[in-house]
DNA sequence: CGCATGGTTCGATCCTTATCGAAGCATTCC
DNA sequence: GGAATGCTTCGATAAGGATCGAACCATGCG
């Protein structure tokens, strides 16, 4: 009998297979409708609806109504980070597959985490941004350096925060076990990578695969 | 119906109130016996035993048998990190207490996370260690710089890894949302803080409170 | 206005799992 | 060896919650 935040409540929300599949699907970053999520989870529509209302009540999802469509998405990058952490443990503990399939390898290199890039490339990128002093680790957060602001606007990335969401935020990477860049800037960079066609998203997966030329471009801009 | 790591399995292990309380208690870093954990969780001994075997089977705990005592502890810093992440979401989502109690404030400043220090002090410390180039963010991990090895041995901290456990590792802080230092070095630093009596552990809590003099000493050594 | 589509609510069923008392092992102490 | 302690297993009970079909709301289209 303890006080404190109700961690069992949150964990049990993720602890149901149907809900876990839904959350996993939403880690791709795109909001999905109830029927899509039902399909993803392998349950009937009423069942999915019930799960979704529980996830909403638990504060893990946000809902955007557009006409007769209702799009569900992860509530925050923090929730995404938690799910990444759980995935990490499940990976470590689970049946160590003898040979990680090609898709897994691709996921380790680069993948989508909610709305930003994760994986080795993303971690390396954050390191370089620190090295180049475009970002600064401030006391409580990652901050954009003045030179960084110039740099990113020159790249056509709008770094003016619109909502209350922070521009930069650290997000722990489950494969590398170090932080990569989240926040609006992280999201904007992923947008650019896709828009420039440096990489494309693997269908029905979170993996992001760079084209040979795209990889060179990306590395020139962000890993130089 | 998806492939991949069984995240629901892991989350559902944490999702039971009794088990969550046990894990929470183990976040203090000290291994506990089944009866202590039963008390902590508010369940009978048989019930606790059943939960513990499930947590063991799930790979979340380790067991050390000593005579007729059996000590349960968290399996890894990764598991501790996952629990921190869940706590973070539960905090954010939960009933925002109008006024965070004094103990909560103390927890935010400094607390034990598994076997190392967490909280604002810990995050600030890691930042300074990077700034002073005692630690280096390598591609895939935090590494000890040559100067750092000298520095820590001079402080009487043994940084020679004994087990397979890494010397340095990042662990995401739920209150600050940035990484602090885990691994054997993180554990050794916490040991030193306690051994030097710079701080003491709050009873029945994860909070770590520095004495005025101890705080000065700590800051002189690690935040200079 | 009526119909089709996307989604939620209701009610009943079924299964999982948490729980505890009692009994059973194992280890240590006398 | 016997008694005591720490813990686990067994068996029975009970409660929670996941599931689906059917009925019910809401939005958009013709």
Image (spheres, coloured by chain):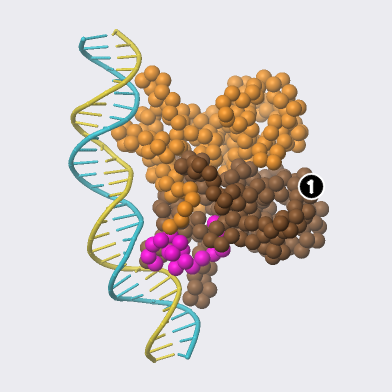
Chain colours: A brown, B orange, C yellow, D cyan
The image position of residue A212, as x and y in percent, is 71, 56
Residue A35 belongs to magenta span: yes
The image position of residue B193, as x and y in percent, is 62, 25
Q: Which residue is mark 1?
A: A133
- Rendered-image quadrant of the N terminus of chain B: bottom left
State which quadrant residue B33 falls in.
Answer: top left
Q: Residue at x 62, y 36 (%)?
A: B169
Q: Chain of mark 1?
A: A
The image position of residue A181, as x and y in percent, is 67, 51
Q: Can residue A191 be seen? A: no
State which quadrant residue B17 falls in.
Answer: top left
Q: Can residue B168 be seen? A: yes
Residue A132 vs B46, above or below: the answer is below
- Rendered-image quadrant of the C terminus of chain B: top right
Q: Is B72 positioned to the left or the right of B127 in the image? A: left
Q: Residue at x 45, y 37 (%)?
A: B59
Residue A132 vs A64, above or below: the answer is above
Where disc 1 sits, the SS reads loop
Q: Residue at x 41, y 61 (%)?
A: A42
Front residue of this view, candidates D14 and D2: D2
Q: Is A135 positioned to the left or the right of B5 in the image? A: right
Front residue of this view, candidates C2 and A136: C2
Q: Residue at x 48, y 34 (%)?
A: B75
Magenta residues span A27-45
Residue A185 belongs to magenta span: no
The image position of residue A25, as x and y in percent, is 51, 59
Residue B148 vs D22, above or below: the answer is above
Q: Is A123 positioned to the left or the right of B205 in the image? A: right
Front residue of this view, candidates B47 and A192: A192
Residue A195 vs B109, above or below: the answer is below
């Amino acid at each position: 009998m303890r006080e404190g935040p109700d961690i069992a409540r949150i964990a049990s929300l993720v602890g149901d297979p149907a809900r876990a599949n839904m959350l996993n699907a939403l880690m791709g970053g795109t909001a999905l409708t109830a029927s899509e999520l039902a399909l993803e989870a392998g349950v009937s529509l009423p069942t999915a609806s019930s799960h979704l209302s529980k996830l909403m009540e638990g504060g893990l999802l946000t809902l955007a109504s557009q006409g007769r469509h209702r799009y569900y998405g992860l509530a925050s990058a923090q929730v995404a980070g938690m799910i990444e952490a759980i995935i990490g443990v499940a990976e470590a503990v689970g049946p160590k597959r003898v040979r990680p399939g090609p898709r897994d390898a691709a996921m380790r290199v680069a993948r989508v985490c909610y709305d930003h890039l994760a994986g080795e490339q993303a971690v390396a990128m954050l390191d370089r941004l620190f090295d180049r002093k475009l970002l600064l680790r401030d006391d409580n957060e990652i901050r954009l350096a003045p030179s960084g602001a110039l740099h990113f606007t020159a790249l056509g990335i709008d770094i003016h925060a619109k909502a209350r969401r922070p521009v930069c935020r650290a997000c722990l990477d489950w494969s590398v076990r170090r932080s990569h860049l989240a926040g609006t800037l992280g999201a904007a960079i992923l947008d650019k990578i896709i828009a420039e066609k440096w990489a494309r998203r693997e269908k029905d997966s979170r993996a992001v695969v760079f084209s040979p030329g795209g990889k060179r471009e990306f590395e020139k801009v962000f890993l130089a």
